[in-house]
Amino acid sequence: MRVLVLEDDPELGPVVAAQLRGAGFAVDLARTLAEADLKLSVNRYDCVVADRSVPDGDSLTLLAAHRRTGSALPFLLLTALDAVSDRVAGFEHGADDYLVKPFAFAELVVRVRALCRREQPARLPVLRVDDLEVDLPRRRVSRAGVLLSLSAKEFAVLEVLMLRAGEVVTRTELIESCWDEASEPMSNVVDVLIKQLRRRLGAPDPIGTVRGVGYRLGGSSGAGDREPGAGART
């Protein structure tokens, strides 16, 4: 899940982004309304976390503009303005949630995750492909009943592959869903992560490679699809 954070505070902004990345989100950071609007026009996001007051105005103007286009993109507003009238104004402009500063980062993560999942009502709480199981609410992965330990990024990639089991997921789609602007799209970041994930999942390898395109989990994935040199893993 990819999140846009709009926060002009030079200390708080990077910390918010780091906390969300640590929870498994891909995060882009903007410091002005103009920068946020540009990023929203070129990237697909699952949620926006926006400070109310930034150098070039109030985030409510950005929120209202997007609502006028019919966008249902979830917005969570961060603000030091804690009056009831301020919260009401936020919701009247189309905000989905409101968090008053100072706040606990654990609460922010939970609220952002809930907003992201709200946009995907058909998503099942537990995904299963053959003997592989992903429990989304508890963020647990098991294979043949054995609990596996995955990094946040490995979990994010596996979640995308599980949700589209049997389909080919391109490298570009994985980058757009699981990485942010801090990643270099032309690098082999996806291939390196897939190799790590394969080691975590063990044999037989459930992830197939469609050469020159991307990866597929389930269906006809398996040894026949793997890239040269992708032998058995421990």
Image (cartoon, rainbow, N blue to C red):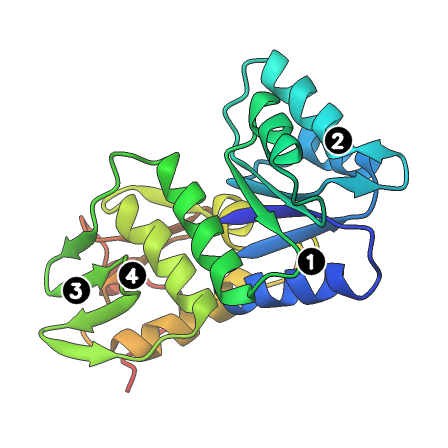
Residue 207 numbered mark, or none? 4
Which SS class for mark 3? strand
Residue displayed at 49% across by 44% down: 173
Q: Does label 2 or label 1 sit earlier along the sequence?
A: 2
Taking 1 as reference, is 167 left or right? left
Which residue is under mark 1? 184
Question: Quadrant of the rendered structure where residue 206 is?
Answer: bottom left
Give the answer, above or below, for where 129 lies relative to 169: below
Task: Specify whether residue 93 is in view.
Answer: yes
Q: Amino acid at mark 4?
A: Ile
Q: CA distance from mark 3 to mark 2?
A: 40 Å
Q: Amino acid at mark 3?
A: Leu
Q: Categorize mark 4 by other alpha carbons within 10 Å: few (<14), some (14-19), many (20+).
A: many
Q: CA distance from mark 4 to mark 2?
A: 37 Å
Give x and y (percent) for residue 142: 19, 72
Which SS class for mark 2? helix
Give the answer, above or below, for where 54 lies relative to 193: above
Which residue is under mark 3? 132
Contact (Cβ within 8 Å) of mark 1 with mark 3: no
Residue 37 numbered mark, or none? 2
